[in-house]
Amino acid sequence: MVSPILTVPRLERIPFLRHGFGDFSWGEKNFRKLADRQGLKPLFLNQVHSDVVHFIDEVPQRRLRGDAAVTRLPGLLLVIKTADCLPVVLVEEKKRVIAAVHCGWKGSSQGVLEKVVLGMKERYGADPEAILAAFGPCIGGSCYEVGEDVHRAFVESNFPASLFRPISGRGGKYLFDLSCANRLQLLRLGVKTENISSIDICTHCDPMYPSYRRDKDACGRMLTFIGLSNR
């Protein structure tokens, strides 16, 4: 039987780490059962397509508004919901600091992943060269059609225009590689190429993954999680 949760082998080898990317069949009820079995407390965010990052040094009493969470607290599962956007989890093994990041086009153009890595470094002493990153399934560069507003936002933020491919005969329309844009952010910060893993599944093409572009409001959400075991 195929597991509804995908993991990355390099992260699987870290004994105190729990992580995964769930498919269409794996909902919040399944996730909470997994968290209970692991003895871990889920931490969901009110995601708003922003560059807001929360550094969690104590368990919050309310749901936080933003699109990334960073912590060194054991016993928490950081959770990201997506449906075409790119989910990213990170860990610096020596410092035992982790992050979960929702990388939509707005947050990505505003450098949300950059803010996470810099925060891991400045607040917790993480070494960017030692950070391991895993990209989950997201909409692929051959399916993600965007307009001039998205193109302009990234070019004005000093991303290369090569991330966009103009669509012939459709002025102001482009195909955009969201995953590549976020990989570039990590490389610019000193994260090593060999430390970036990617599950190369296009959510728009694969019916086992939620896609807002494909199914609109009926799409559901994919759950991504990362946590430090307290056992």
Image (cartoon, rainbow, N blue to C red):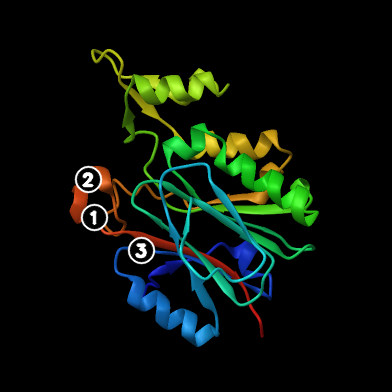
Q: Amino acid at mark 2?
A: Arg
Q: Earlier in the sequence, mark 1 or mark 2?
A: 2
Quadrant of the drawing holding the C terminus: bottom right
Q: Earlier in the sequence, mark 3 or mark 1?
A: 3
Toward the viewer: 216 or 207?
Answer: 216
Q: Which mark is residue 159?
A: none
Q: Please, what secondary structure does the residue beneath circle 1 have?
A: loop
Q: Quadrant of residue 190?
A: top right
User: Distance between the Cα atoms at labels 3 and 1?
Assistant: 12 Å
User: Distance between the Cα atoms at labels 2 and 3?
Assistant: 15 Å
The x and y percentages for residue 210 are 29, 55
Asked if the residues shown at circle 2 and circle 3 are in contact, with their CB atoms under 8 angstroms apart, the answer is no
Q: Earlier in the sequence, mark 2 or mark 3?
A: 3
Please give the residue where the numbered disc 3 appears in the rendered image: 23
**Picture residue at 41% right of the left edge, 22% below the top:** 151
**Picture residue at 43% right of the left edge, 42% below the top:** 104
Q: Which mark is residue 214?
A: 2
Q: Please, what secondary structure does the residue beneath circle 3 have?
A: loop
Q: Give the left or right position of residue 106, taking residue 134 as reference.
A: left
Q: Quadrant of residue 134?
A: bottom right
Please give the residue where the numbered disc 1 appears in the rendered image: 219
**Picture residue at 77% right of the left edge, 53% below the top:** 126
Q: Amino acid at mark 3?
A: Asp
